[in-house]
Amino acid sequence: MHTENTRLKNVLGEIETLRMKRQRELADRAHSPWKRFTQQELNDEACPTYKNLLIGRSRRIPDRQTIIGIAEYLECTSGERNDLLLAAGYLPIQTELAGRALERALEWAQQTMKTLPFPAMIVTHTQDIKGYNEPFRRLFDIPPDPCYNNELNRIDLHFNADLPVRPRSTFDKTSFEQWESHAIHGIQAFKRNHALSRYDVWYQNVVRLAQKYNAIEKYDHKPDVEEEGERDCTQIILAGSESSGELVPIRYRQVSVSVGGRLYPQIEVFLPVDASARKVFADLGCPADCEFGWTAR
């Protein structure tokens, strides 16, 4: 009983510390949310027994799902939510790889990518591109500047009109519609996959980068018309043909391979779909047999 009382005291202390922190942060917000982060509001919105817990009328620690609901109400980062769960005696939620685990996964991804004869890049949960191979650079005509191999983000790759990928992927009505469909799906999939991390600094940084291109305003609220299992994973781009020296439209598909036991980091591999693509890929040194046993995402 003493241990249970101590645990309850600790979790209430954690909640109150976070609640008062959010109240102080209200003054810095450009637009005041509906929340006021009061004890009564927390009781009404997230934990119906909270006021009773504070006055000692109830001594039962809220269940795990209620603690997660409190963390959502308090707009907790992943670290803050896990501190609350641990204080209440529950297992934390491991969302993304970090530290040495992420480093090991990236090292494995780099070694794996070196064995691939197809264009490929490595992407983390922050949408940073942590390396790509030479066939990828040549296919998408990325400038041979070392900084691109260290600072490029998938959002830049898709939206930045200064890189060749964007104009070459939207050269006519059909390609633009397909490009836009992938933008809508990508933004909504990112939000869905990382919902528990949406108050983390890294997540907010990704949102700010997307806002730089007005991507959130344009595509966040548009319907994603294709079901996940029925998505057309093919894409169209104008690619350079070494034999003719001209840009030709090709169709390719993207295959995602997760490493490290989480959704990210991923190796994104690009495979030809039509005859024009196979010819361009052959110029890149890719083999004619392009079939893998992987599932495209």
Image (spheres, rainbow, N blue to C red):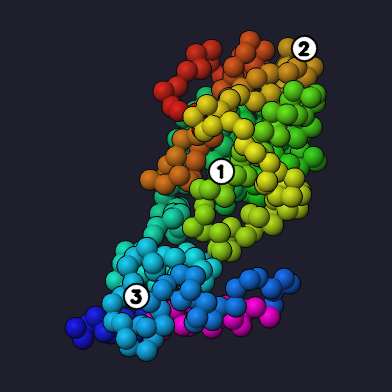
Inspect the image, locate mark 2, and give the three-letter code of the amino acid beneath it.
Ser
Inspect the image, locate mark 1, and give the three-letter code of the amino acid beneath it.
Ala
As displayed, is residue 186 above or below residue 290?
below
- Say what secondary structure mark 3 lies in: helix
- Which of marks 1 and 2 precedes in the sequence? 1
Image quadrant holding the N terminus, namely bottom left
**Residue at the spot 57% in from the left edge and 50% down from the top edge:** 191
Residue 238, quarter of picture: top right
Q: Residue pushed farthest left?
A: 1
Query: What mark, if any, has residue 244 been given in the picture?
Result: 2
- Point out residue 210 in the picture as x, y percentages from the top left corner: 70, 50
Q: Main secondary structure of the magenta part?
A: helix
Report the magenta residues as a range: 12-27
- Which of marks 3 and 1 precedes in the sequence? 3
Inspect the image, locate mark 3, and give the three-letter code of the amino acid beneath it.
Ala
Dot 2 alpha-carbon crowd within 10 angstroms: few under 14, some 14 to 19, many 20 or more: few
Pointers 2 and 1 in contact (C-beta within 8 Å) = no
Pointers 3 and 2 in contact (C-beta within 8 Å) = no
Residue 55, quarter of picture: bottom left
As displayed, is residue 268 above or below residue 42?
above
- Point out residue 196 in the picture as x, y percentages from the top left corner: 49, 58
- Say what secondary structure mark 2 lies in: loop
Residue sitting nearer the eye, 21 or 56: 56
Residue for badge 1? 189
- Which of marks 2 and 3 precedes in the sequence? 3
**Mark 2 against mark 1, which lies toward the viewer?**
1
Q: In this view, does 219 lie to the left or right of 2?
A: right
Residue for badge 3? 87
- Say what secondary structure mark 1 lies in: helix
